[in-house]
Amino acid sequence: MKVIATMLLGAASLIASATSAQPAYPARPIRLIVGFAAGSITDITARQIAVGMGKELGQPVVVDNRTGAGGNIASAELARARPDGYTLMATTPGQLVVNPLTQKAIGFDPETRFTLISLVNEGPFVFVVPANSRFQSVPQLVAWGKTNGGKLTYASAGIGTTSHIAAEMLQVFGGIKAVHVPYRGGSQATNDLVAGRVDFMVDSLGSVAQQVQAGQIRVLATGGASRLPQFPDIPTLSETYPDFIASSWLGVTGPPGLAPAVVTALARAVERSARDPHFVASLEQRGGRVAKPGPDAFASLVDKERARVERTIVRPGITLE
């Protein structure tokens, strides 16, 4: 018995020693996957927040762009990643909500429950047209679309992206059908809108702010619950179509099964980084704001977004592929 007791004590000592030898998290650089091109609004925001997270965590947070398929390539990579806290993703509504609900082939199980760490920011979309467009309001455009079926065209940053889903929602609420012209990124879509090759686009203000300020495109409506301070005279879409809210957000997620202690550390780093005055000022210039932090607030928003997409896109049978 003494021999067995000695062996058990020795084993316990080895386990305790091995456990105490584990380095504190994080012990090396963290990779932050971005599913969209460098220079996109998602990429810019992700890089800003990555710098702040790195300072908070004491390790660099390195952005890794994995573009394509409306963010699905990046999402699939995150789904395969080890849940050790060293692979994260800057996640958009399209990747987390829209694509799994509306697309058949996304490269990973649509039921995958990514670890929700914290939201970074959110902001309303804007409904924009070329500077020389015939349309002076959304109701005018919708009325024209009803009498000229199939002739309206709209641009998006790609199939299943948030700009795509927002434009599809407008068609549902307005009772029209427009031709979708998807691009491989927001900048390409905006360039063709400026050139007048498409009739309209719905996207985040940050993505089109430069062209709006230059007078190359016009804002007809905004997608938030209230008017933007930058455009106090421009109506919201909900003023014409009650309950129509079109907005975007960015959050930080991890692979399934991330340890709670790691989630806590990362959520704290995201929140503190997002509260940096320089980051806040940058967001406000783009019409955005810092979102409510933490996993619980993130989960609540995702539940609401899923219900909205199911109501306006899935149930009517709209195909996004």
Image (cartoon, rainbow, N blue to C red):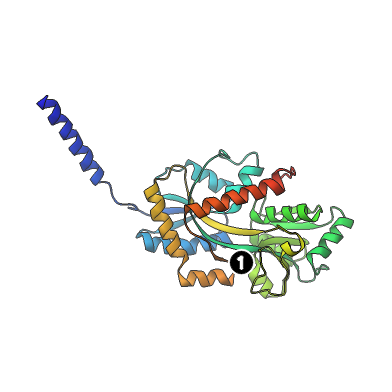
Q: Position of residue 265 (x, y in %)?
A: 38, 55
Q: Is residue 128 left or right of residue 56?
A: right
The answer to whether any part of residue 306 appears in the image is yes
The answer to whether any part of residue 89 appears in the image is no
> In the displayed image of the protein, which residue is found farthest to the front?
242
In the image, 223 versus 184, the foreground residue is: 223
From this view, report whether residue 5 is shown above or below residue 235: above
Q: Residue at x 30, y 51 (%)?
A: 24
Q: Quadrant of residue 176?
A: bottom right
Q: Quadrant of the C terminus?
A: top right
Q: Quadrant of residue 163?
A: bottom right
From this view, report whether residue 135 is shown above or below residue 92: below
Q: Residue at x 58, y 72 (%)?
A: 285
Q: Position of residue 188 (x, y in %)?
A: 67, 60
From this view, report whether residue 210 is shown above or below residue 22: below
Q: SS class of the residue under badge 1?
A: helix
Q: Is residue 238 left or right of residue 185?
A: right
From this view, report whether residue 255 is shown above or below residue 237: above
Q: Dot 1: few (<14), some (14–19), or many (≥20) neighbours within 10 Å?
A: many
For disc 1, the marked residue is: 206
User: Could you tell me the amino acid type at mark 1?
Assistant: Gly
Q: Position of residue 183 (x, y in %)?
A: 68, 55
Q: Residue at x 58, y 46 (%)?
A: 72
Q: Is residue 186 left or right of residue 174?
A: left
Q: Quadrant of the N terminus?
A: top left
Q: Residue at x 55, y 51 (%)?
A: 300
